[in-house]
Amino acid sequence: MSETISYNNAPVPVALTINGQVHQIAVEPRTTLLDLLREHLGLMGTKKGCDHGQCGACTVLLNGERRVSCLTLAVSHDEATVTTVEGLAEGDVLSPLQQAFLEYDAFQCGYCTPGQLCSAQGLLREGHARTRDEVRELMSGNLCRCGAYPHITDAILSVLLTQQPAP
Amino acid sequence: MRNFGYFRAASAAEAVQAGATPQVHYLAGGTNLVDLLKYRVEQPEALVDINRLPYGHIEELPDGGLRLGALVTNAATAYDARVQARYPLLSSAILAGASAQLRNAATNGGNLNQRTRCPYFYDVAAACNKREPGSGCAALGGHNRDLAILGTSESCIATFPSDMCVALRVLDAQVRLLGPAGERVVPIAEYHRLPGAEPWRDNNLLPGELVTAIDLPPTDFGQHYTYLKIRDRLSYAFALVSVAVALRLDEAGHVLDAHLALGGVAHKPWRVSEAEDLLTGQLPSAEVFGAAADALLAGAKGQGENDFKLVLARRAIVRACWQAAAGTPQSQSDKHIR
Ligand SMILES: Cc1cc2nc3c(=O)[nH]c(=O)nc-3n(C[C@H](O)[C@H](O)[C@H](O)COP(=O)(O)OP(=O)(O)OC[C@H]3O[C@@H](n4cnc5c(N)ncnc54)[C@H](O)[C@@H]3O)c2cc1C
Ligand code: SF4
Ligand code: FES
Ligand code: FES
């Protein structure tokens, strides 16, 4: 038989591991992962830019893959692992990408930055970007209203180049 | 967003049974459906989550083709080594669409069934026959820059926005369906519809039917192909016009076989056999490619704001034919069009 049914729009229990911590929560079927993070769990690092999949500010890692959390229904991802910008550092030690964003001055207002960082983390894991053009193309899902693109690309490339052996 | 019920289907039979109720939608990646729920363009009573069904694999077919499960993501399809080696046109078209994040979530079944991006379809205050049958069409005489120039009707001039499906059309894919009445297979050519008098029907899927897979027949288009997408930004935007071309050439360079289709110009990927016949047996030349472009665009009509598409499409077709003939497909990261 079916696993879960919500009649009358009743909340559905889901278990999510978010930044290493297990959360058992009941969510209305319409709750997006973005609203769950921000409204239910108070994790405000993930930003709501457009709420329509068009800006990338809400990017998180879902089972290690980058996704826009605004178009992701939480109910559909029972037992998933989520990493948000709050989970990128190891304690006080910034991740290589976070460090590079500081070094390369890869933000101005910072609104897009959590999404940029999570997206770049996903890009590194995917392993399909090798050149500057490829980084730009595969980061095109993250808009930056301040136009910090050249420095964002530099920061990501710097980490990419330390991670891959020279050809 | 209005709230709705939720049903997580554990088997295909269960999904099809639940999905046959009107006012129920299948949920795959959600990248289109959740957006439409937010705009209240779709207001289902319940969603049937199909993500646990066993359609998440790419498999070899006995005839040398490939079966793409409906739940395989667009990203996993585009980067699959077999798809890249044997159907590079499909990889290229998928990678020309949306963004990396969206392709990680978007599924093959969802891509096939995504809805138009006509701005009035999204605006519940506007007249739109596709959203609300009989209410009229605000795009006729309205903002129609992005909309169709081919196969339009008096009731709707929307385009079908998929990039992936333009490549599927060129590759003669077959769509596998499971419904309350059992299984059936529909050629991609007959899957999507023209708007006609029933623009609310995007495709020929029957109530409750589920796409289970997309079958690719064996082809030999690994060398001479291209997917050329023209849009307002260099990335992360829907096509104004896109062209998929696949050719087979003999040793002297004559065209043995030509398949071409357009995206961004009609309610379905647009392909015309007369245009392809004009290429067969010919050596590449501006005249031959131009004649094929004219045949592919026969009957095209601008709607005002989108008149530019007539010229743009012709040039894009000719350029794409050159790219395919030369074996230099359009890069999806180096944006120069050569
Ligand atoms: C900002 C943005 C930009 C985009 N840009 C592009 C682009 O440039 N090019 C492009 O091609 N696409 C683009 N897309 C669209 C994207 O490709 C689609 O949203 C995606 O392919 C839909 O897949 P999904 O699995 O998320 O479908 P869902 O959103 O889950 O479903 C979409 C529809 O298909 C139905 N459905 C899903 N799976 C099945 C099935 N197996 N059987 C029957 N019905 C099913 C659902 O009921 C629903 O009606 C863009 C989307 C966004 C948000
Ligand atoms: S073109 Fe089609 S989708 Fe757009 S407003 Fe007219 S009827 Fe609606
Ligand atoms: S808030 Fe999700 S993409 Fe903009
Ligand atoms: S730093 Fe301001 S939006 Fe990117």
Image (tube, rainbow, N blue to C red):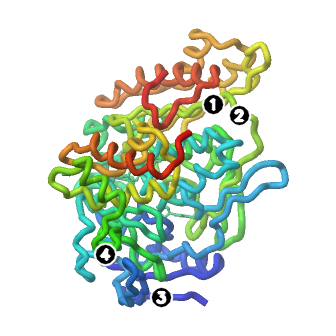
Secondary structure at numbered mark 1? strand
Relative depth, front residue between B287 and A25: A25
Name the residue carrying label 3: A5
Q: Chain of mark 4?
A: A
Quadrant placement of the N terminus of chain B: bottom left
| Tags 3 and 4 both on a single chain | yes
Q: Is residue B235 above or below residue A39?
A: above
Q: Which mark is residue B221?
A: 2
Q: Which mark is residue A91?
A: 4
Residue B330 position, x and y percent, is: 53, 30
Residue B38 position, x and y percent, is: 30, 66
Q: Nearer the viewer, mark 3 or mark 2?
A: 2
Name the residue carrying label 1: B225
Q: In whole angstroms, how far apart are the C-alphas of marks 4 and 2?
A: 52 Å
Q: Which residue appears at 71% of the width and 70% of the height?
A: B182
Q: Chain of mark 3?
A: A
Q: Label 4 crowding class (10 Å Cα cut-off): few <14, some 14-19, many 20+?
A: few
